[in-house]
Amino acid sequence: MIKNCVRYSVVCVLCVCYAFSVQAQEVLPLESEFKEPTTKLWLNTYGNIRVSKRLFWVAQTHFRFEETESTPFVGQVAQVYNRHAIGYIYSKKFNFSLGGVLRLNFNTDASSVDRNLVPEWRIWHQYMFAMPISTMMFYHRIRIEHRWTQDFADDSEYEFRNRWRYMFKVKIPVNSHKLQPKTFYISPEAELIMQSGKPVVGSPFEDLRLHASFGYILTPRITLAAGIMYSQGQTLANPGIYKQSWTARFHVYFSPDFRKVKNKLPAIHLDD
Amino acid sequence: MIILRLEYLSYRILFGVLLALPIVLSGQEKKLYEGPSQIGTYKGEASYHYVIANNDTLLNGSFLLKSSNLEALLKKGDISFSIKGNFKDNTPSGFWKFQFNEFKTDKASTVEDNQYLVNVSGTQQIASGTFQNGRPDGQWVYVVQQIKNSQVDKFTFKSVVDFNNGVPQLSFTIEDEKEELVGMFLRNGIAHDKWTLYSDENIDEIESWNFNEGILESVEIRSGNGRIEKIKIFDNVPKANTKTITLDKKYLDVLKIKLQKKDSKKLVDGGIMRLLSQNDRYYKNIDSILSKKTSFTFLSKFNVKIPYFPLETIEKVRLDSISKNYESSRGISNSLLSNTQLTILRLSDENVRSLEESLEVISKKILDPLEELVSFYKEEKISFVSRKELLSKIWPDGVPDVHKIEKGVNGNSLISVKNLSHKTLYRLDSIQQILAKKITKQEREQEAIALEKKMIAQRNYLDQLSDSLRADTIPPVFFNTLQNIKKDTEDKLSKYSSINDVKAKLDYARELVQCFEKLDKVGETISKLPAQQYDIRSKYQDAVWNPFTATIMNETIKKRLIMAYEDVLIPYYLKRIEDGLPCEETEQWINLVEATYDRMLELRDEDTRKLERKLRKEDDPLVILERLSINSQIEKN
């Protein structure tokens, strides 16, 4: 099953690259242009709610703010994410999820006369691999999103795109020999987000996110983290123009387990 | 018609009686018992006939009790016996033979008529004679003889007495290897005329007791140089003031006290007294057997008359008082003289030595004579000698004074003896008190040393326990609490050392040893607390899979319980010690701590959601104890 997923992902990425090579647009600048970085603030909550021995409910809500002219980072609300899914714990080292996203996009263009808020719908699935190395944990995440977006214009139609995301992340405990409660950790992270779809002409490279966070595992059920992220990627309208941003990210991870005690046991023996 | 019926009835009764007769007769049918039996110390195989009458076993017919052990004989020698005779209606009757043997064998054996015969050597006693109506009648012979190679070698004692219905008659002879006593009785068994002792080595008589109708008037003893010495005994005694008694040990004792010391010695050393005593002893042996089996006695009944001085009531009262004082005094004296501590103390303590010497003198010069007087009274011999004569024999120089044992003369009366016994007791009591203080002081000192050693060891034990709590991983509060206990013990020791009164100090030391033992146990409990906490924490850990890290993490569950235990109860327990836990509450404290631990282990697997809700924000330890049902846990245990 894992092999199939990987194969499928690779095929998808190749297709995107092919599309990129044949759909270059005429208005391309002679050289890549990098926009001035914007500043953003993301407040992310990640909930993994255990519902059975192997299934969990993914419930994430992200509040994303963007700078305004007068206020960096938190000037205005840009998006509110509601990401849900059902996850399956295949083993301690692999789990996958499938669900939907409702993203509320706010019009951050002050001069715009269009709608202020439009929804965006996604179906997403992700495949998470974990690798313990020494006292650290390495993670590989493949996330594929099928998104339907529309512009703020009143008569705007939904456009369908796919997103191909790969993230590599490390968690390094600082004050402990392993990731356990009362542990601070450092987590460098890199994610490449590619996109495809009819509207994507020459700009499959949507985003490269480099994120470093510093976290604290309060309990096995609550972890807090904060970090800074740099990202860049092609604008959809012009592949020669790259947007950049610096984002302050704050994360709250929670994983409640409302199962009765007798159903919890034995939590540790997932492969039995 | 009625007459006929009555006749018919009387026939029926007669017929019934005739029918019942065999049953009545069969009730008295002679039965034979064969099996183990015991009379006094004589234990063996018995064979006797008896009848049952009114549920009583009545001996009737032949009787035999015997014992012999061939195995014992072959190994180290055997003491065997045989008692053979007849009873008639539970009364000894006819010929009887008592035989007691103490044999060894040289193990040489022969076979004759298909029987193994072994040679024996040793001593044999045989008493034989006849009984009539339970009393010796006719000639009784008591022989003690040496047996060598199963043959009589020689006799060492022989008495031949003729009885008539239990009363000795005419003449008797008692002899041993060298001497022979010949004596006479009146018909009523009273000693009369001259009792003469002959020796194999002398043609002439060597000793004679001259009786006049039972009264021993004089004794004549031939001395080594052939001269006859006459000792007057009961000379010119009015017959009215005499009493007839048996010539036994009691009589002979009175004779001894009656005579001058040198005369008494001659009499005691003389053959007649020896032979009479011996005969009396042998007869008493038979009596001890017979009187245990029947209501009859077997005594030689050699009767004599003796001056009689009946005790007056006031004399009895005084003698009782003397006896009592004597016994108490002897008790004190013996206990002090046998006290090993005093024996050691007298080596170093002049005062103790002096008092011990006084004790020895009192024991010898007062208590020994008092003992003689008291035994005369107890053995009912005192009526046969005048008190004055008795006391002058016991204390020839007069009744002494306890404070001037050597000199004091207080006359010769029971009053003065009573005073003496009283004063002696008083004196001994005072000596005892003085010496007891010495002993007690020494004992106390020794005990105090032992207790102090123990107390120090107990305090040091707390140090050892403290060491185990010095680890970095253990919160210092435990170590500090142990230090509190240690300080408490040191305060108590300090208080102990400041006490001057020896008795109070010793009492406090005893109390402290017990207290410290308890505090040591509290210390042990405290030293176990970190491990118990660790156990509980471990037990309240649950392995949780963290989806964000994809790792298993240990999660503490039922945190409110853990918090109640760690943040409220444990500090509460330690605080109680910090506040000074009284010794008498230590056991309860230990029980509480142990019960809390046990209860916490139990609660891990119980459904505690309601309980956890109740524990929210609760910080009163007593309420928590109640909610955790720990008090009921203690009661359950």
Image: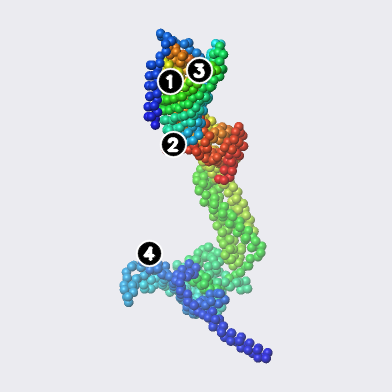
Q: Tags 3 and 1 in contact by the CB under 8 Å rule?
A: no
> What residue sits right under mark 1 in the picture?
A196
Instruction: Give the letter of the chain under mark 2.
Output: A
Q: Which dot marks residue A248?
A: 3
* Residue situated furthest front in the rendering: A155
- Identify the residue shown where x is 39% and y is 21%: A15
* Residue situated furthest top in the rendering: A30
Q: Bin the neighbour count of mark 2 within 10 Å (Cα to Cα): few under 14, some 14-19, many 20 and up.
A: few
Q: Position of residue A118 (x, y in %)?
A: 54, 20
- Identify the residue shown where x is 50% and y is 38%: A263
> What residue sits right under mark 2 in the picture?
A269
Whole-number angstrom distance, CA of label 4 to CA of label 1: 122 Å
Instruction: Check the image and report above or below for A33 versus B102.
Output: above
Sequence-first tag of 2 and 3: 3
Are the residues under marks 4 and 2 on the same chain? no
- Nearest-to-viewer mark from 1 and 2: 1
Of residues B344 and B599, which is closer to you in this image? B599
Q: Tags 1 and 2 in contact by the CB under 8 Å rule?
A: no
Image quarter where the C terminus of chain B lies is: top right
Whole-number angstrom distance, CA of label 3 to CA of label 1: 28 Å
- Nearest-to-viewer mark from 4 and 3: 3
What's under tag 1, amino acid-wise? Answer: Ser
Q: Tell me if I can see residue B117 in this picture.
A: yes
- Nearest-to-viewer mark from 3 and 1: 1
Q: Position of residue B571 (x, y in %)?
A: 57, 33
What's under tag 4, amino acid-wise? Answer: Lys
Q: Tags 4 and 3 in contact by the CB under 8 Å rule?
A: no
**Which image quadrant is residue A88 in?**
top left
Whole-number angstrom distance, CA of label 4 to CA of label 2: 83 Å
What's under tag 3, amino acid-wise? Answer: Ala
The residue tagged with tag 4: helix, strand or loop? loop
Q: Which dot marks residue B76?
A: 4
